[in-house]
Image (tube, rainbow, N blue to C red):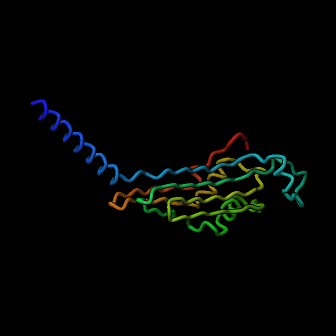
Amino acid sequence: MKHNQTLLFSSLVIVIMMLFITVSCNYSEEPIISLEVQVLELKDEEYKHVGTFGLDNPSKNDFRKFTFNLEMVHSDEIIRKVQFPSFWSDIWKKSINSIDNIDRYWFGNAHTQDNESGQVSYSIEFIFYSYGVSEEEIKTAFHSIPFKILWETKEGFRVENDYIVGDVIEFVGLQL
């Protein structure tokens, strides 16, 4: 009788382990998505690179830095797509310049890394002339930039997240 209980217990443990292994092999982990959209004050070193020719009595506080960072890391079981109106176009410049009749975009750069093996990142950073502009005007200017993050598992589970840049901006440590 004791031998039958041991055999039954061993069989039960084996079945549970096989079930656990099967479930974990079929489980597709959700991707890790990090999104950061900020307007920041310039550091002294950054302001040294800002050309201010043509401005009346400019100061460091007349400029801000805009940063957009999106990173997504996922397993090979995930199929993903990030959609922008056009990440490399001058849409960022057009958006910040749409506030008024002043050329507010000063300079900037963008970087994209898109590895099919599980990592994607989009980064843009630029300096803009912020004198006389409110936080609300900046948010409104970036309402023209929607983007979408889509991902799905090979089993067909699908997630779609829609964003508007103007809705996710954070103003860090500053008052405009």
Total marks drawn? 0
Left or right of residue 117, residue 145 in this image: right
Q: Which of 132 and 115 is in front in this view?
A: 115
Residue ranking furthest to the top: 2
Residue ranking furthest to the left: 1
- Which residue corresponds to the image point at 83% horizontal and 48% vertical from the top-left? 60
The answer, for residue 33, to whether it is visible in the render is: yes
Q: In which quarter of the image is residue 6?
A: top left
Q: Which of 54 and 83 is in front in this view?
A: 83
Left or right of residue 31, residue 174 in this image: right
- Which residue corresponds to the image point at 73% horizontal and 44% vertical from the top-left? 176
The picture places residue 132, in percent across and down from the top left corner, at 77, 50
Left or right of residue 11, residue 66 in this image: right
The answer, for residue 102, to whether it is visible in the render is: no
The picture places residue 141, in percent across and down from the top left corner, at 64, 57
Q: Nearer the viewer, residue 160 or 151?
A: 151
